[in-house]
Amino acid sequence: MVVETEHIPYRADAADEKPKAKRQSRWSAVVMNPLRRIFGHYLFSSLTRRILFLNLAALGVLMSGILYINQFRDGLIDARVESLMTQGEIIAGAIAASANVETNAILIDPDKLLELQAGESIVPSADRFDNLDFPINPERVAPILRRLISPTRTRARIYDPEANLLLDSRHLYAGGQVLRFELPPVEDDDDGFVQRLDRLVARIFRRRDLSIYTEQPGGSGTAYSEVMGALAGGRSRVVRVTEHGEMIVSVAVPIQRFRAVLGVLQLSTQGGDIDKIVQAERYAMMRVFLVAVIVNIILSLVLAGTIANPLRRLAAAAVRVRRSIKLREEIPDFSNRQDEIGNLSSALRDMTNSLYARIDAIESFAADVAHELKNPLTSLRSAVETLPLARNAETRKRLLDVIQHDVRRLDRLISDISDASRLDAELVREDAVSVDVAKLLRDLASILSQSVTNPSTELRLFTAKLSSGQRGYFVMGHELRIGQVITNLVQNAFSFVPDEGGRVDIRLAQTAYHVVVTIEDNGPGIQAETIEKIFQRFYTDRPGPDQFGRNSGLGLSISRQIIEAHGGTLTAENLTDPETGDIAGARFTVRLPRE
């Protein structure tokens, strides 16, 4: 035989990587896996993530609307405009009052001067005030403007009637004043996260309908619409933004004296004054928002913990129940919560207990079946082995009778076991219908009375009279199975009544909630210590040796199982003679819920 092998070359780096891979696997097992379990399964399970997302999403939408604060910003602009208008009117009135008239000047009309002839002269006009002028003297106005503007951060500019700049408060300085200029930083420091976030928010919510503010060369006011509007005699306002997005509010009021416009006063805010107020409000709201986020996260985790953790424990317990075959796992009890989780816990506990009870019943049933089948099989085997050794015909006949008896017993056991094993499945698959118990008992009594082998045995049926308003004896169930129970009980009573004067009575009545069927006989009754044992599987207690092996002991057990599946009860008791107090027979009572 030739064995082919594949040569694998040695790789030196593979051995070098093993310690590193081993360290990584150890780190993953010791540190990463517990963290992954804690944060991946405990704190941030699927349900926890959904709760956090929904709560934070609602909070985020609210915060977005707060950060927008458009109405707040518009209110600030309106308040600032009103303040500037009031301030402008005061300053314009002071400037107009300081304007002086030049009384030493003689005003001559040049056109009239050219029309004069030799030796003629001009007579001054009677209304000489029409020719007077009230110019704005920058030297007199500058101190007034400086005193009125200095306490504020407002920029003031004065224009003449031709929109030429006369004064700018930015270039007015008092004597001995130290001039300070802001220089750019030597090194550009990186802004923090909060500053970058604030600029991003400001850029997102910036108004797009505002024009860009630019300084005009030479100080001409013709480029400012508010200045030109004030030269026409009205008050004007304009909101602009700088190249950096800073908002500037500008107002212009006319400087008037005797309704004559002597010039225009323009007042404007510094770039970013309003934005700083809005920014301060944003910062305050962000702090409140961060506190709300922390509180929301904590409350969400607590809420998720009260929901997700119990569900996780219930799921883990259900998995353990599925995997554990021999052990009996306990489902966590949350029934004291009085909510859906508690209801789910109670339902799972009841289901698990029912499952364990069913498993125990199956195991017990299998053990009982094995035991009951073993007895006839042992007897049958002994008879078969002894048959060849029989010396006479009588012995062989007796052994053949034993064999036939055991075969019939096995056939009866197998039939009853098959019926008992498929009983639950049939009751679950079949739909319950309305059953007329009175009609069912009449039909069964007619059939069973004909099947009695002893003519002296009597079967009687008694039905209680219905009261007014009662339509009959109706229950919800399976008619064939209820009939099987009545048949088993009647045939069981037939087997106990005496040969002479035997009597079996079927009585039908009803209470407020149940239909009651009783089967009474005049047999020997039931021993007090075996009243409950007779309902156990394969239990039989019949007098006489000839009764051995004639019953499987499953009839009463199956009957109780059927009645309990219908929500009713099946009980047994002894009848007593009212005169002597002796046992006068047995009574089986079936109670079924009324329809």
Image (spheres, rainbow, N blue to C red):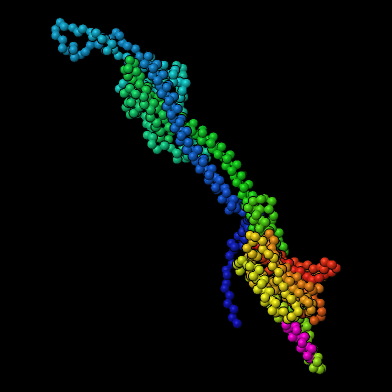
x 43%, y 29%: residue = 78
x 67%, y 75%: residue = 446
Left or right: 60 in relation to 162: right
Which residue is situated farthest in the left direction here? Answer: 118
Pick the front one: 83 or 436: 436
Query: In what quadrant of the picture does the N terminus appear?
Result: bottom right
- State yes or no: residue 406 in magenta: yes
Residue 539 in picture, x, y percent from top left: 77, 73
Residue bounds of the magenta highlight: 396-409
Pick the front one: 116 or 251: 251
- Specify whether residue 470 is in view: yes
Tag count: 0
> Looking at the rendering, which quadrant does residue 349 occupy?
bottom right
Q: In this rendering, is residue 399 above or below 204?
A: below
Residue 175 in picture, x, y percent from top left: 45, 16
> Looking at the rendering, which quadrant does residue 4 occupy?
bottom right
Query: In what quadrant of the picture does the C terminus appear?
Result: bottom right
x 57%, y 47%: residue = 52
Q: Is the magenta stretch mostly helix, strand or loop?
A: helix
